[in-house]
Amino acid sequence: MATVNVHEAKTHLSRLLARVESGEEIIIARAGRPIARLQRVEVARRQRKPGNDRIVIHPDFDDPIPEWDPDYMHPGDPMRELLK
């Protein structure tokens, strides 16, 4: 278990976090007196269960979109001619 002072912890926080990530525990001290402990947090990951996602396909999913239908488009819209 390593001990570092507050100034060193502020200056080298990224390095200290890398050490903690590898499993080391670090004590932060102010004036030689321990005030905090940096230690790795173990996060329990849930196992993913394949097939749990629900997919809903509506019956009208392939119907034309009204704004692209030439009958609904503005007469001056240049796309109107391309869709005919």
Image (cartoon, rainbow, N blue to C red):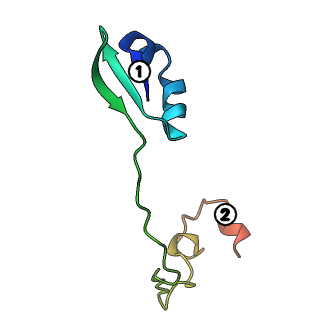
- Quadrant placement of the C terminus: bottom right
- Residue 53: which disc? none
Q: Residue at label 1?
A: 3
The residue at the far bottom in this view is 59
What residue is shown at x 49% (from left), y 92% (from top)? 59
What residue is shown at x 41% (from left), y 51% (from top)? 42
Q: Nearer the viewer, residue 70 or 40?
A: 40
What residue is shown at x 52% (from left), y 69% (from top)? 67
- Quadrant placement of the N terminus: top left
Q: Is residue 15 above or below residue 67?
A: above
Q: Is residue 41 above or below residue 59?
A: above
Q: Whole-percent x and y of residue 26?
A: 42, 28
Residue 40 appears left or right of 73: left
Number of numbered discs visible in the structure rendering: 2
Amino acid type, label 2: Met
Q: Earlier in the sequence, mark 2 or mark 1?
A: 1
Q: Secondary structure at mark 2?
A: helix
Amino acid type, label 1: Thr
Q: Nearer the viewer, residue 56 or 83?
A: 56
Q: Nearer the viewer, residue 43 or 79?
A: 43
Q: Whole-percent x and y of residue 53?
A: 47, 80
Q: Secondary structure at mark 1?
A: strand
Q: Residues within 10 Å of mark 1 (few under 14, many from 20)?
A: some
Q: Residue at label 2?
A: 79
Q: Whole-percent x and y of residue 29?
A: 32, 17
What residue is shown at x 51% (from left), y 39% (from top)? 21
| Spatial CA span between label 2 and label 1 | 70 Å
Q: Is residue 26 above or below residue 53?
A: above
